[in-house]
Image (cartoon, helix red, strand yellow):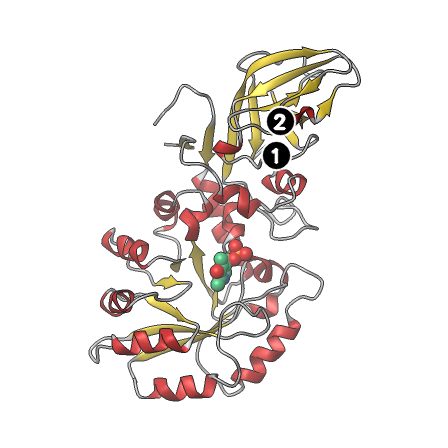
Amino acid sequence: MKTSRPIRARIAPDALLHNYRLAKQHAPAASAWAVIKADAYGHGQWRALQTLRDEADGFALLETESALALREAGITQPILLLEGVFSARDARAVVESDLTSVVHCIDQLEILIAAVNREKPLKIYLKLNTGMNRLGFTAKQLPTVLETLRQFPQTEVTLMTHFAEADGERGIAWQMDRFKAMTGKWQGPVSLANSAAILRHPGAQADWVRPGIMLYGASPFADQSAEALGLQAVMTLHSQIIGIQTLAAGDRVGYGGTFTATRPMRIGIVACGYADGYPRHAPSGTPIVVMGRRTTTLGRVSMDMLACDITDIREAGIGAPVTLWGDALPADEVATAAGTIAYELFCALAARVPVEVVGS
Ligand SMILES: *Cc1c(COP(=O)(O)O)cnc(C)c1O
């Protein structure tokens, strides 16, 4: 619904394309899954698909139903189910619609084997637990799993693992060592790298990389900006000032009165609150852009509004444009101020926020 209420999420398909190509440049010998789970990290699965359909080597997501919808929409590239199958129905869909499924435990393996059709390939990503301790087979389980799969010559197996600290100091070497120890004689395809590993660990590109957050133009690192990585913001959340208040020293702002003016101030009330997906935990001082100029939020974020300091932006009146995050203000900076990561900001974008696509 195109509302008169001025909040919008502007999506830039060119930036998404740029970021996907950048991932490919970092892993020139690998193929790249475009990770479009969680509705393309809040950017809209169908929008992302439209942009990448002639470009991406494959698409990775969670729900079998979404994968089937992609097939129905004519997507012919590989489609990867990142958490594998949840039911026998899922398993049949994997076989019948040529999906690729992660297999992270024996139960999933059994469900898939029950759906095997000798006429059709079964494409699986065997997930190994190399230290993240979330999903995956142990070193002890792997030989049995591979032995079981040898009875099904139509299976096409890729080995994968997921890095827990590719963005941090500990890095990936310790997990790479465990992976190599587990898979010593393995000659088949391998998939390892998320965005952080793609950007920082060139030795881990293997056969298929799995870029997610970098496609959407945010940095996976606390110590390196998206801009420094050459990434472009895909989503810009913007709105307008809909109210103005003049404060005297001692006046407080918003619920709980958590901000107190220590001098006369002019504040702008912005049509954007936590029900739009803006983080409620963003404290006073979170960066925000008004009429192209950087300022800060003040007081608690309400459901539908937040306040910001426009004392020094005198030309800002009702209707003044505000950027919450995006091309003029990295989502990473807002996320950091709010004690979270850009992934969460993007995924939390509320359904009530109208989306506009640049160039359409
Ligand atoms: C979500 C996900 C990714 C993408 O991670 P980013 O940090 O967003 O690049 C890669 N691999 C797996 C298994 C995932 O679930």
Q: Nearer the viewer, residue 106 or 154?
A: 106
The spot of residue 189 in percent (x, y) is: 44, 76
Q: Nearer the viewer, residue 121 or 136?
A: 136
Q: How many marks?
A: 2
Using the rendered view, name the quadrant where residue 289 is placed: top right
| Residue 311 sits above or below residue 119 on the image | above
Tell me the number on the disc at residue 83: none
Amino acid type shown at disc 1: Leu
Measured along the vertical axis of the image, is residue 298 above or below residue 209? above
Q: Going 43% across and 60% down the picture, which residue do you hit?
A: 33
Q: Is residue 4 visible?
A: yes
Residue 125: horizontal and vertical position, in percent? 41, 72
**Mark 1: secondary structure:** loop
Q: Which residue is mark 1?
A: 329
- Secondary-structure class at tag 2: strand
Distance in Å between CA atoms under marks 1 and 2: 7 Å
For image coordinates 56% across by 27% down, the residue present is: 302
The answer, for residue 36, to whether it is visible in the render is no
Q: Is residue 210 left or right of residue 163?
A: left
Q: Earlier in the sequence, mark 1 or mark 2?
A: 2
Q: Residue furthest front?
A: 256
CB atoms at circles 1 and 2 under 8 Å apart?
Answer: yes
Residue 314, horizontal then vertical, whole percent: 67, 12
Q: Please identify the quadrant where the C terminus is shown.
A: top left
Q: What label does residue 289 carry, if any?
A: 2
